[in-house]
Image (cartoon, rainbow, N blue to C red):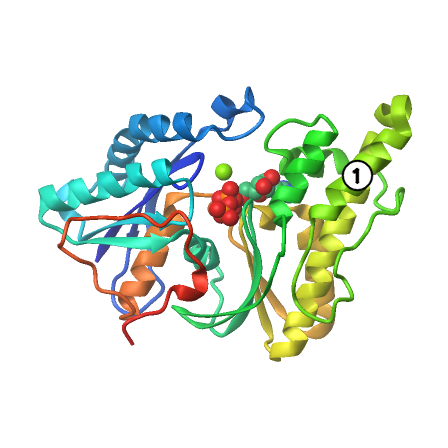
Amino acid sequence: MLVLGIESSCDETGVALVDAAGAGVPKLRSQALHSQIEMHQAYGGVVPELASRDHIRRVLPLARHVLGEAKCDLRDVDVVAYTRGPGLAGALLVGAGVACALGAALGKPILGVHHLEGHLLSPFLSVDPPEFPFVALLVSGGHTQLMRVASVGDYELLGETIDDAAGEAFDKSAKLLGLGYPGGPALSKLSEQGRGDAFKLPRPLLHSGNLDFSFAGLKTAVLTQAKKLGSELEAHKADLAASTQAAIVEVLVKKSLAALDQTGEKRIVVAGGVGANRLLREQLNAACAKRGVRVHYPELHLCTDNGAMIAMAAAMRLQAHKEEATEVYTFDVKPRWPLAEVGGLT
Ligand code: ATP
Ligand code: MG
Ligand code: FE
């Protein structure tokens, strides 16, 4: 079963082909990605209208490239999957519209996929895929959640951020430090030249006794510190960046360990853009090694948005009989869509 996946929820256009033969973990045949980061950089963030228009320009050439690389014809595709939500409505509509049109033209079924389920299942694209059940730490630009994942489509929310997401905390703090957009990678790079214990920054909700997060106060603390430094900021920028990163990572690691304790699981999966963060990987790996817990990540280039994770999530849902692809070619998108609402047929 060949699944063509289309991702267009935000500022990355991704297309991929995944092959689900038999009961094994589906295999990635090919994928292509176009990031709009450069286009949005001038505005300091994603401009929704520009994002939609660029998805329109990119999606079919990317699909052609993916099919060519896999030496497949469009007619070989069995299911066309697309990101149904959450995300920017206009951007989502592009992927959904193209998927629907392709499906209708080919007489093949289509399937709308939850973007976060894509992130969550992205470690299955790696050479050493996890096994169910596991705890998942979903850390992206818009979400920070801890979940217990029993199987495909069986997601229990353990805790989440009550305000900003971890990626947002990276991005907003980076912006305050004049590091541009997206701030996560930039702040993390600058941190390598600084000391994480140079400035005392808050660890919000660290001892809250539950698995919720809060990062909104952190950027205020960073701003206060930056103002205090005044003309000295430039000289201490790397230290402030490193201290910000240390604060975010400490909270993510400690809450992840608490989720492992609470559930008794021996495996954790990290997914979403912040999963690419080196300090997070180092500290989580070290803490989990001590406890005999296995940690799984997506490959670095699959941490942020991509088509492969959407094709993979669709293939795994179909394989697990959680979903039936449909030949009804009317589509909708869900800009707001809690992952816990994603159940299944069985
Ligand atoms: P969502 O999936 O919640 O809709 P999104 O798709 O925008 O949000 P992702 O593409 O998963 O989010 O991740 C992007 C986020 O990851 C950005 O906030 C970015 O700054 C952050 N990020 C990427 N690389 C790193 C890194 N190395 N360190 C820290 N943060 C990073
Ligand atoms: Mg992005
Ligand atoms: Fe994402």
Can you see residue 292?
A: yes
Q: Which residue is farthest bottom? A: 264
Element type where label 1 sits in the image: helix
Question: Does residue 310 appear to the left or right of 244 in the view shown?
Answer: left
Residue highlighted by disc 1? 222
**What percent of the width, then of the height, locates residue 333?**
31, 47
**What percent of the width, then of the height, locates residue 205?**
74, 60
Task: Name above or below for residue 275 compared with residue 224.
Answer: below
Along the line of sight, the residue nearer the viewer: 214 or 267 = 214
Question: Does residue 145 appear to the left or right of 290 in the view shown?
Answer: left
Along the line of sight, the residue nearer the viewer: 29 or 271 = 271
Q: Residue at x 67, y 47 (%)?
A: 278
Q: Residue at x 38, y 49 (%)?
A: 85
Q: Residue at x 41, y 25 (%)?
A: 50
Q: Quadrant of ligand 1?
A: top right
Amino acid at circle 1: Val
Task: Name above or below for residue 50 compared with residue 199.
Answer: above
Instruction: Specify the quadrant of the image occupied by residue 319.
Output: bottom left
Along the line of sight, the residue nearer the viewer: 312 or 289 = 312
